[in-house]
Amino acid sequence: MKIATASRQIFLDNQEDVAYIRKQIRKMVKMADDRGEVIAICHPHSETLQALREEMPWLKQQQVDIVPASAVTRVY
């Protein structure tokens, strides 16, 4: 069918807790380092947005690019 697909590897906010989400963000970066790429998903919960704001300075120091999931889809 030649449809581009991808699969999520980590869910950032399955607990609506800022500390938990911050740990998931760091886990996401470690996974990206290990695998070369990772797809993470989350919701626009206030806790998620707060965790992302708090982690942004750290994220900017990492060797990762944050891109839309469509950038890592592949046709199989």
Image (tube, rainbow, N blue to C red):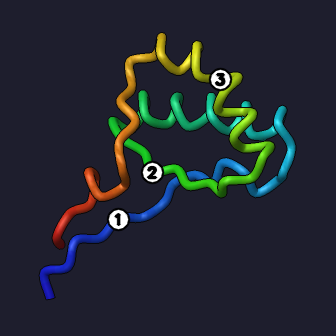
What residue appears at the point 35 percent right and 42 percent down from the top-left corner?
67
Q: Amino acid at mark 2?
A: Ile
Classify mark 3: helix, strand or loop.
Answer: helix
The label number, if any, that marks residue 55 in the structure image: 3
The label number, if any, that marks residue 6 in the structure image: 1
Label 3 or label 2, whichever lies nearer to me, is: 3
Distance (Cα) linking label 1 and label 2: 8 Å
Q: Amino acid at mark 3?
A: Glu
What residue appears at the point 42 percent right and 64 percent down from the top-left corner?
7
Classify mark 1: helix, strand or loop.
Answer: loop
Distance (Cα) linking label 3 and label 1: 25 Å
What residue appears at the point 18 percent right and 72 percent down from the top-left corner?
76
**In the image, residue 15 above or below residue 74:** above
What residue appears at the point 58 percent right and 52 percent down from the top-left corner?
10
Q: Are marks 3 and 1 in contact (CB under 8 Å)?
A: no
User: How packed is label 3: few (under 14 Cα within 10 Å), some, or many (20 or more)?
Assistant: some
Quadrant for residue 54, please give it: top right
Which residue is denoted by mark 2 in the rendering?
39
Of the image marks 3 and 1, the number of the one nearer the N terminus: 1
Of the image marks 1 and 2, the number of the one nearer the N terminus: 1
Q: Amino acid at mark 1?
A: Ala
Q: Are marks 1 and 2 in contact (CB under 8 Å)?
A: yes
